[in-house]
Image (cartoon, coloured by chain):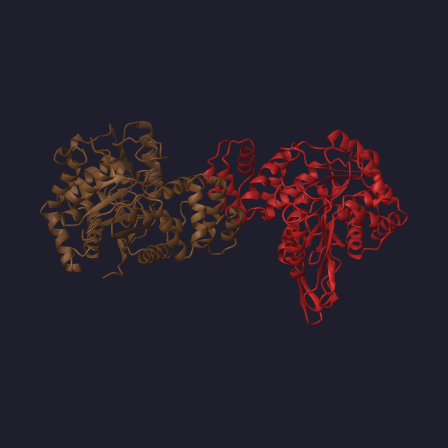
Chain colours: A brown, B red
Amino acid sequence: MTYNPVQLILKKRNGKVLNSEELEYLFTAYKNNQLPSYQMAAFLMALYFRGMTVEEISDLTRIYINSSKLIKFPRNMKTVDKHSTGGVGDKVSIVLAPIVAACGGNIPMISGRGLGHTGGTLDKLESIPGFRTNLNYNEFVEQVKKIGVAIIGQSEELVPIDRATYALRDVTATIDSLPLITASIMSKKIAEGAQNLVIDLKIGSGAFIKDEQTADRLADYLLKTGENMEQRVAVIFSNMNSPLGYYVGNSLEILECIEFLHGKDIPDLKEITFALAQQMLLLSKIAKNPLEAEKKVYKCWQDKTALMKFKQLLAAQGGNSEICDKPEKLPQATYKIDIRAENSGWIKQIDCESIGYALVEIRAGRSNLDSRLDPGSGAYLPLKVGDRVERDDILGHVFCNDLKSGKKVARQIALSHIISDVNVSKENLIFKIVNPNN
Amino acid sequence: MTYNPVQLILKKRNGKVLNSEELEYLFTAYKNNQLPSYQMAAFLMALYFRGMTVEEISDLTRIYINSSKLIKFPRNMKTVDKHSTGGVGDKVSIVLAPIVAACGGNIPMISGRGLGHTGGTLDKLESIPGFRTNLNYNEFVEQVKKIGVAIIGQSEELVPIDRATYALRDVTATIDSLPLITASIMSKKIAEGAQNLVIDLKIGSGAFIKDEQTADRLADYLLKTGENMEQRVAVIFSNMNSPLGYYVGNSLEILECIEFLHGKDIPDLKEITFALAQQMLLLSKIAKNPLEAEKKVYKCWQDKTALMKFKQLLAAQGGNSEICDKPEKLPQATYKIDIRAENSGWIKQIDCESIGYALVEIRAGRSNLDSRLDPGSGAYLPLKVGDRVERDDILGHVFCNDLKSGKKVARQIALSHIISDVNVSKENLIFKIVNPNN
């Protein structure tokens, strides 16, 4: 069947539903360079405005998957993964994967790089001397089978239609389309072979989702697409109005992960990591009930088997596992600049997105996929919404190798903390958990 | 000033207003191949959904004009033109221009080709043996000065940003954006040097505008942009629920125009042509009041000075003016096929768009700008909404050079006449006239 692309763009533009053949024609032709990118761009923008039905989203996910190399694990293996919609200081994967692996899960994690104001797990891991994120699929599968966890980047064979589409979305202001986000997440997680998936759906100033209504819609798409694709999915709605943990920046976050795995109590990092880990154990049936899940997770953190698993992961992927005991071996920045409170009062709001973008200026984050990172730069930001500060108190520090930029960034971060002279309540970290599978 | 195109697309996508520098950057960069077409395509689709303010439309019109060669006539010359938003059987320009020129107007008409279901004035004129539509601008200006009228096509120097943008809109389903239509019409008519402009805004099954609300919005944009650009504009809202006149097809419509200029009464063609001509005389101050305008128009039609002007126009542009007295010199089709009524009753609806598309199959219209036309093919369609027919009555004829396609087209046209067994009222041809200048 041949289609007239203009008619298909028109159909979506006018709010009609496309069938799976029509979607397949468009996306496959685009990937094969048989549909001009300007037509795909117009289609994607029409789709941004008109949205998609759950059936269209499932069809698109299937089309994405059909274009992909599929990684397979034995059916009886308890494969489980997590996806986060992204935040500032979101280092969770780096501690979560070893914890769940230490509890008996198998985590075939294909992760991404940072872009815009959010960091990426791969960038953080690559600040560890020697760590390789480009294992081939054989190495990847073998490592997951052997030690229960591997974390790599997306190769060109993994869901190539999504890769091609994502690259176009990035330059046409069509990234934040919920149906496209759903197909992108679900197709990659299914293609990598994980049968169970927990989504950390972040909401707030540092997330791309700012409101509950949008979050509910995305969760609904993810859960229903999971159902249609026979993928077991749970969603945790979490707060991204304050940076997660105390540090933002690549090697700084690795350092923080190591401290956490050594037993340091970092309340918000611990709360979200443990909640996600528990859901992963429940979904993959490693734990029979929430209490058992909670106990397992706590135990492997406290007895350091999770730390051992992390060391094993580093060693398996060429990383220097000595950093776990000698963190000074991680890249460090030259300068440490104080960030000082502009006023006295309660922190009413932290504009995490602005903080993320400010940190791009000292190369702690990427402005585009070719940006070179400075692995040691970043910031220490211990305060959360609701904390009390006095004028001139230290709000945190900027770590950088360029003093002038660093000072500018420190000032921008100070301005990103909105301070109120009336009392502000602390916020919950976890809003709700939806797991229809148990 | 440099801009980030993604930020500008995002701005429009999120419903914000762009300033003139931002619009200029986007459209100029696109025309100069400095902005990828996929970004322009995404921007145009966002603009389709979000629209533009009158100020943005005026800015865009100005940007279009600034990219163009400008044709100038002496300020005291009464330059006036007409633009039609397009319909089926719309041959008005071909009789209107000679009438207004015969009344003392100067009509520097730059016209277009047909596309989709609507015909184009240039295609019709080119069915006249020898007629040239590619005069250079010197020839064009001199001819308007000498005989009061010239009709040519748009060269590459005329509003090149509109040309480039239109080509992209055509393949990305963004043609029917009212702000873009407004900028396109107004910039071309201002660049061609006409100080006064009457718009024939067609509404109905054969027009791209199907409802009054959309028509009002477009008229408002045209009138306000005219005001901002110091262009005197009037708008006639006219009915396009029945084909205009009796014939559709290139040489068939020329034949009909000649019959009309010879004095034949073709009610709807006469009504709309005279109304437009009167507004043109009023706008350009050739007539002081409606009654004077009416008299002047009627007189030059009745005493055949309009016919003489048409002959002069043909001669000036290399066309064989003998066709006016020997119409058999026009291209003619081999076959004439009857179109018969499927039922008895009153014609409730004529799907003029379907008729236009059906006629593309016998090459009376174009499917794309490279389509080769068959100048003699087309149809005789004398019935209007509200007319009474009996089953098997002749609804009209198809003229063609391919018998098989012609029969198919005759059947499609028959099906495009919806016949009701209850009485249907005849419709008005002219809905309203808006001329804020007098």
The residue furthest left is: A303
Q: Quadrant of residue A163?
A: top left
- Of residue A138 and residue A240, the one placed in the foreground of this image is A138
B229 sits to left or right of A137: right
Give residue A154's position: percent from left, percent from top.
Answer: 30, 40
B430 sits to left or right of A273: right
Give residue B64's position: percent from left, percent from top.
Answer: 62, 37
- Of residue B261 and residue B53, the one placed in the foreground of this image is B261
The residue furthest right is: B303
Give residue B58's position: percent from left, percent from top.
Answer: 62, 42
Q: Quadrant of residue A115?
A: top left
Residue occupying image coordinates x 14% and y 44%: A264
Numbered marks: total: 0
B328 sits to left or right of B17: right
- Of residue A289 and residue A161, the one placed in the foreground of this image is A161
Give residue B160's position: percent from left, percent from top.
Answer: 62, 34
B64 sits to left or right of B38: right
Q: Can the viewer see residue A4 in this picture? A: yes
- Of residue A202 and residue B388, the one placed in the foreground of this image is B388
Q: Quadrant of the C terminus of chain A?
A: bottom left
Q: Can the viewer see residue A209 in this picture? A: no
